[in-house]
């Protein structure tokens, strides 16, 4: 049953990808298998250039890192919890299978730059890449009229929202800003066994110190308004998408310069040029432990991962200071 549902979700997402590519004015239309092919991170695309111009290319210019004082642990914990979806119990959802990116809606060169960055972010977080000619399970679509696009999906292809509840779908529709993102998750046994056709999950070992289930992210979908990309670098866009799709997080209500999630927030004078130390620490903390665990335990490890990363950043900057 789970395989049938995933097939329906994938078909609906690919229909949207094809529609986005067909409506594209600036580049030839491409199906998801071509425009969204996983690109191995053979090189990191520098955070230079913008989508308004050509995609970023290799550059010999040095990267200057300016360190900031280490924020209090409580501030890091508060920001981490602010972007994490609330769960009453059980584990946080995440990808346990290899990831494959499908993109459409921008010129091919720009999509490739974003794809390289996404692949690099995934590897640095500890995820596995599916490789060439894979079936996308992360869809990134650049569209016009993002609100209208999502409303049309609700009317015509509601199944693309997977296991999202009606109230969660309403929240997605009512969300403001140029981005809409959601994931489709599935409950499985702690050993990865899917729910049987009878709706029962086989639990090999019952214990109170760890959850007997896990939440697998089957697919993540991110829609971004094309007009909002003006002045944004491919690296910034890729890093933002990585946090939304791989981390399953949402931007904090109060804009913060500590995270790339502020990229499209008007309340920030200058958004980060790339994924911050906070963001890297968050993804590493989320994907470090492969065994299933309660959300509170994962949240604590995420906070510790961020604190260590921030401390290392400050220490490295201090060594480089004249």
Image (spheres, rainbow, N blue to C red):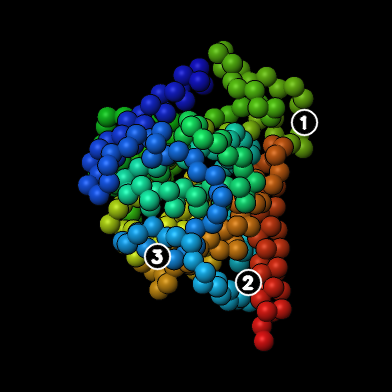
Do the numbered discs 2 and 3 sit on residues whose CB atoms are within 8 Å? no
Residue at (34% x, 34% y) in the render: 31
Give the Cα separation between the discs numbered 2 and 3: 30 Å
- Mark 1 burial class by Cα count in 10 Å: few <14, some 14-19, many 20+: few
Q: Is residue 182 visible?
A: yes
- In front: 27, or 192? 27
Which of labels 3 and 1 is toward the front? 3
Which of labels 2 and 1 is toward the front? 2
Q: Label 1: state its secondary structure.
A: loop
Residue at (42% x, 39% y) in the render: 36
Residue 148 place in picture, x, y as percent: 24, 44
Residue 16 place in picture, x, y as percent: 32, 35
Q: Quadrant of the C terminus?
A: bottom right
Say above or below: 57 vs 127.
below
Residue 212 place in picture, x, y as percent: 69, 30
Residue 149 place in picture, x, y as percent: 27, 41
- In front: 106, or 162? 106
Q: Is residue 296 visible?
A: no
- Mark 2 burial class by Cα count in 10 Å: few <14, some 14-19, many 20+: few
Q: Label 3: state its secondary structure.
A: loop
Q: Which residue is mark 1?
A: 207
Q: Which residue is situated farthest in the bottom direction here?
A: 322
Which numbered tag is attached to residue 71?
A: 2
Which of labels 2 and 3 is toward the front? 3
- In front: 229, or 147? 229
Say above or below: 301 vs 50.
above
Q: Label 2: state its secondary structure.
A: loop
Give the Cα separation between the discs numbered 3 and 1: 52 Å
Tell me: 298 left or right of 218: right
Q: Which residue is mark 3?
A: 49
Do the numbered discs 2 and 1 sit on residues whose CB atoms are within 8 Å? no
């Amino acid at each position: 049953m789970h395989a049938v549902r995933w097939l329906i979700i994938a078909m609906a997402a690919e229909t949207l990808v094809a529609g986005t590519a067909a409506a594209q004015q600036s580049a030839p239309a491409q199906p998801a298998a071509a425009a969204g092919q996983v690109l191995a991170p053979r090189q990191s695309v520098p955070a230079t250039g913008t989508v308004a111009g050509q995609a970023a290319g290799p550059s010999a210019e040095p990267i200057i890192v300016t360190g900031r004082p280490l924020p209090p642990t409580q501030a890091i914990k508060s920001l981490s919890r602010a972007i994490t979806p609330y769960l009453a119990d059980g584990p946080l959802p995440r990808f346990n299978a290899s990831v494959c990116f499908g993109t459409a809606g921008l010129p091919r060169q720009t999509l490739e730059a974003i794809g390289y960055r996404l692949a690099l972010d995934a590897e640095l977080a500890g995820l596995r890449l599916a490789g060439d000619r894979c079936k996308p399970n992360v869809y990134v679509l650049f569209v016009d009229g993002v609100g209208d696009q999502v409303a049309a999906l609700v009317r015509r292809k509601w199944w693309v929202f997977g296991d999202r509840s009606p109230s969660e779908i309403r929240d997605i529709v009512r969300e403001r800003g140029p981005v809409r993102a959601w994931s489709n998750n599935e409950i499985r046994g702690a050993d990865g066994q899917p729910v049987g056709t009878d709706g029962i999950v086989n639990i090999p070992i019952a214990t109170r110190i760890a959850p007997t289930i896990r939440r697998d992210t089957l697919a993540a979908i991110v829609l971004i308004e094309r007009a909002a990309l003006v002045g944004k670098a491919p690296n910034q866009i890729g890093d933002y998408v990585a946090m939304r799709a791989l981390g399953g997080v949402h931007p904090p209500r109060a804009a913060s310069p500590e995270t790339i999630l502020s990229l499209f927030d008007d309340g920030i004078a200058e958004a980060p040029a790339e994924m911050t130390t906070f963001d890297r620490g968050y993804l590493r903390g989320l994907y470090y432990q492969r065994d299933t665990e309660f959300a509170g335990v994962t949240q604590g490890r995420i906070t510790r991962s961020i604190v260590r990363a921030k401390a290392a950043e400050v220490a490295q900057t201090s060594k480089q200071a004249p």
